[in-house]
């Protein structure tokens, strides 16, 4: 019954009729199990409920799901008819499974990540993001909801192809372990792509950037799709039943790194869409610390277990790439610590000594990252040195100390320059984070290409040997240093050391203001509400 | 309930909000009036925690929109000018999603849904797809979304925009009903006659600056501290004119046999009543006594210059 009438005053909302809507959503169910179901669904992230209601009704999902099913059935019929009569006496599971994986990868590695990206960008385009952001949902709930709904779609696609995959097992030639391993890897890549797509959508919310971000993402997804499809067709469907224990340990190590990295990526996406005065930095830096700790643990473990020093190089270069990317994001942070963030600053002496690194702000982020990577390099070098002396590792010709030191210098210089430039950028610049990443890319490109082009030009476009003028070229300098020290490398190291000290020092001086900040008290209104919140008990939602 | 304290917001060289301060109390409807580009929407977006001021602060129920946006959001419902909907959903699903988003569960959620559907008159079309809704129904749906969690403060940016006359009247009743419950409402609109009828107080902004705030009567009195009076008589109009000239606060008398016009330099109702009583007791055959009131549009035109930035 409508309560709006042109004659007379409208009735009040409170103390008025509740309304007579008989829609099932407006009713509390009678039966016990239905109430239990409702209780459960109300605890699910509301974004997941919304996405299920919205996305699964969409034409795009219906078409993609239908096409996947048709492709799977068609491949089953075609492959089996091609394999007859050999299928009766020889195993044919691998060929059939390879086809199914190729079919499954299209939705998993292109459609789902792209849908997740579009799901977040469409919220901005349709002006619904503002409505979400002023609700009681946190930015983390929004991002997690999008991720979980993507996972739900993944499960639907997997369930659709499950009977076909079971059929391949029955056709022999492939073990259950192998099927689950490759399936797990495919799902992991899909989840990683989805998380990165959400991060890209979060940092490119300005409409002007969305077209570029869409193209960039599509290129990345297509590369990922063809790369992994080629790997499967080319023999990734290996038999893992007889693998040594170290293989499973490696898989476990990979899984831990992926889990922490995914958490970091999703938290970063949430931070990018959250209100600026919130302290996003401290939780993100704790996760970066955890990620680096895990990388250090597994690299040490791998070096000791395999007695191969090259593994440490792989981890070190991986950590450097991660740090450069994180550094470009961290230096894009606002250089201002909001009063809200200042409420949670440590007050004790120990707290100030050990937790200052986690303070928000681009300056502290830069110092935190450089110190963290420095600690990683130092620990790796000491560990390698210790084990090479005590366990006679295969030292080879390469030396991790020089490369580690050079990478530390590069991180200090490039992230430092980025921070100094971003310091001058306007506070309200749209897509600040993406701008910071773009700035890092431009800076890297410029510092690599300009000396190369100049020297080529001065050298009549003939090849030339490495020299000090290529000091800022990461790949060439590290490659030269890994061969051992030479005079040009020593000269480059000197240049890089001086540049690092200068840039780090300047950043350090500019960050002293942030270090000097002290905790401020919560406003009386906040304290009063917190006091009330501690004594109020949660009511029974069904008011029974 | 709402306090804006010296709010500034710049977009390059443009001062979208330039030192704006005002207060809205519980149970009050505050009309935010100004030409296009005056800074109304920017101020409202800052209050709704969708934007940050360059200087100053805004408080909702004592919580800062800059430092405690999470607490502000629980107390605030915002209906933007251009609001989005999810086209694959129906009305009840849309409201249910936002009820869940505000943490409503169990009976609390179903009660809020029933209340909102009934209050906005959407219960008959609860299962209709949002895609098929008219502009007026979409406005109702958006108002329902803004009030689903029973907030103490509602900010409505051009809520009557694009509505037909009947829907506007209904919206006005809804807004007055919400104020009667003790909610604070900040409403912006270009339809000044409507704001004049529904608002307890108004603020007029131009080029980011608050030009004047107060109740409509206060502002009118401040701009024009007299009233225009028209008296219709059977006859003896000219005699009444001469008689009025001897009375205090009476200015610019124009008299004919049946009509007398003059300015009464006070807005006090008691003095008006005494004058009317004196005219009647003096034996003048008065048929009608009336005052010529100024509309909010007149006030708006007098205060603003029409300049844009």
Image: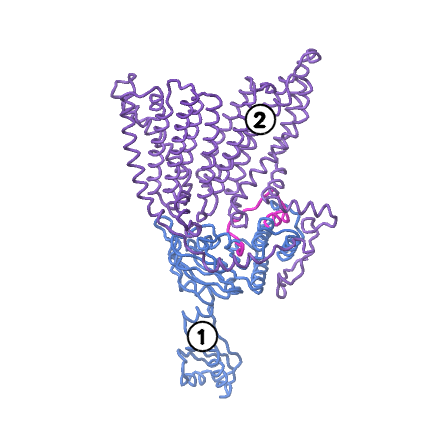
Chain seen in blue? B
Residue A441 spot, x, y in % from top left? 38, 32
* Chain ID, mark 1: B
Q: Is residue A298 left or right of residue A495?
A: right
Tag 2 residue: A105
Closer to the camera in the image, A217 or A405: A405
Residue B139 spot, x, y in % from top left? 57, 53
Report the residue that reaches farthest toward the bottom: B282
* Chain ID, mark 2: A
Label 2 secondary element: helix
Q: Is residue A39 left or right of residue A468?
A: right
Visible in this render: residue B212?
A: yes
Q: Which mark is residue B228?
A: 1
On-image quarter of the C terminus of chain A: bottom right
Label 1 secondary element: strand
Chain seen in purple? A
Please give the range of residues in magenta: B74-98
Q: Is residue B83 magenta?
A: yes
Q: Is residue A302 above or below residue B202?
A: above
Residue A499 spot, x, y in % from top left? 29, 33
**Distance from the alpha carbon under mark 1 to that under mark 2:** 81 Å
Visible in this render: residue A331?
A: no
Closer to the camera in the image, B292 or A218: A218
């Amino acid at each position: 019954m409508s309560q709006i009438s042109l004659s007379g005053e409208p009735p009040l909302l409170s103390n008025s009729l509740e309304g007579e809507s008989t829609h099932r959503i407006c009713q509390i169910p009678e039966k016990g199990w239905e109430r239990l179901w409702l209780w459960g669904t109300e605890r699910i992230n509301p974004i997941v409920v919304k996405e299920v209601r919205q996305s699964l009704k969409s034409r795009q999902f219906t078409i993609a799901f239908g096409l996947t099913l048709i492709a799977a059935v068609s491949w089953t019929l075609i492959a089996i008819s091609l394999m007859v009569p050999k299928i009766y006496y020889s195993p044919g599971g691998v060929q059939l499974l390879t086809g199914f994986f190729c079919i499954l990868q299209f939705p998993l590695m292109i459609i789902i990540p792209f849908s997740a990206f579009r799901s977040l960008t469409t919220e901005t385009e349709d002006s619904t993001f503002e409505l979400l952001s002023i609700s009681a949902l946190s930015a983390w709930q929004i991002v997690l909801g999008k991720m979980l709904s993507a996972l739900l779609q993944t499960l639907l696609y997997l369930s659709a192809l499950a009977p076909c995959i079971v059929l391949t097992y029955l056709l022999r030639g492939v073990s259950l372990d192998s099927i689950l391993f490759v399936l797990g890897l495919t799902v992991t890549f899909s989840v990683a792509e989805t998380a990165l797509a959400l991060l890209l959508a979060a940092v490119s919310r300005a409409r002007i950037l969305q077209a570029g971000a869409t193209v960039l993402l599509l290129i990345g997804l297509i590369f990922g799709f063809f790369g992994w499809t080629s790997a499967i067709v080319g023999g990734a469907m290996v038999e893992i039943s007889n693998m040594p224990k170290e293989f499973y340990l490696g898989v476990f190590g990979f899984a831990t790194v992926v889990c922490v990295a995914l958490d970091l990526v999703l938290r970063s996406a949430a931070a990018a869409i959250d209100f600026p005065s919130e302290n996003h930095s401290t939780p993100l830096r704790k996760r970066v610390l955890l990620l680096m700790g895990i990388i250090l643990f597994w690299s040490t473990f791998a070096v000791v277990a395999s007695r191969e020093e090259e593994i440490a190089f792989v981890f070190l270069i991986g950590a450097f790439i991660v740090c450069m990317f994180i550094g470009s994001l961290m230096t894009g942070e606002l250089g201002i610590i909001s009063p809200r963030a200042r409420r949670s600053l440590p007050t004790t002496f120990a707290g100030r000594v050990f937790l200052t690194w986690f303070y928000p702000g681009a300056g502290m982020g830069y110092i935190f990252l450089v110190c963290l990577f420095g600690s990683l390099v130092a620990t790796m070098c000491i560990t390698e040195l210790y084990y090479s002396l005590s366990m006679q590792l295969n030292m080879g010709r390469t030396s991790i100390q020089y490369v580690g030191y050079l990478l530390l210098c590069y991180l200090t210089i490039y992230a430092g320059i980025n921070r100094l430039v971003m310091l001058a950028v306007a506070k309200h610049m749209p897509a600040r984070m993406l701008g910071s990443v773009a700035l890092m890319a431009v800076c890297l490109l410029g510092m690599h290409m300009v000396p190369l082009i100049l020297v080529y030009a001065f050298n009549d476009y003939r090849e030339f040997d490495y020299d000090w003028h290529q000091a800022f070229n990461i790949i060439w300098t590290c490659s030269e240093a890994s061969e051992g020290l030479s005079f040009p490398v020593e000269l480059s190291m000197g240049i890089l050391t001086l540049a690092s000290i200068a840039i780090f020092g300047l950043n350090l001086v500019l960050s002293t203001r942030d270090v000097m900040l002290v905790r401020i008290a919560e406003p009386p209104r906040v304290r009063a509400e917190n006091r009330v919140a501690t004594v109020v008990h949660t009511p029974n939602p069904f008011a029974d | 309930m709402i306090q804006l304290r010296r709010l500034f917001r710049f977009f390059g060289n443009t001062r979208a909000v330039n030192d704006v301060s005002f207060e809205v109390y519980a149970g009050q409807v505050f009309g935010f009036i100004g030409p296009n580009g005056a800074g109304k929407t920017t101020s409202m977006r800052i209050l709704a925690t969708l934007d940050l001021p360059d200087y100053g602060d805004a408080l909702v129920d004592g919580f800062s929109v800059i430092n405690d946006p999470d607490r502000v959001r629980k107390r605030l419902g915002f209906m933007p000018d251009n609001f989005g909907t999810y086209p694959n959903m129906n009305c009840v699903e849309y409201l249910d999603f936002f009820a869940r988003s505000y943490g409503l569960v169990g009976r609390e959620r179903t009660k809020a849904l029933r209340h909102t559907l009934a209050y906005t008159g959407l219960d008959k079309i609860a299962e209709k797809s949002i895609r098929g809704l008219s502009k007026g129904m979409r406005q109702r749906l958006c108002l329902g979304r803004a009030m689903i969690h029973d907030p103490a403060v509602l900010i409505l940016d051009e809520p009557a925009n694009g509505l037909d006359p009947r829907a506007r009247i209904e919206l006005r009743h809804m807004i007055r009903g919400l104020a009667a419950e003790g909610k604070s409402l900040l409403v912006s609109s270009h339809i000044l006659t409507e704001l004049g009828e529904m608002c307890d107080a108004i603020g007029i902004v131009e080029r980011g600056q608050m030009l004047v705030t107060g109740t409509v009567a206060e502002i009118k009195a401040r701009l024009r501290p007299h009233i225009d009076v028209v008296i219709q008589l059977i006859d003896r109009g000219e005699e009444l004119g001469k008689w009025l000239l001897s009375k205090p606060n009476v200015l610019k008398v124009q008299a004919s046999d049946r009509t007398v016009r003059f300015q009464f330099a006070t807005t006090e109702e008691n003095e008006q009543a005494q004058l009317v009583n004196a005219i009647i007791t003096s034996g003048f055959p008065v048929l009608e006594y009336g005052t010529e009131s100024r509309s909010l549009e007149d006030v708006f035109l007098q205060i603003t210059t029409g300049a844009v930035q």
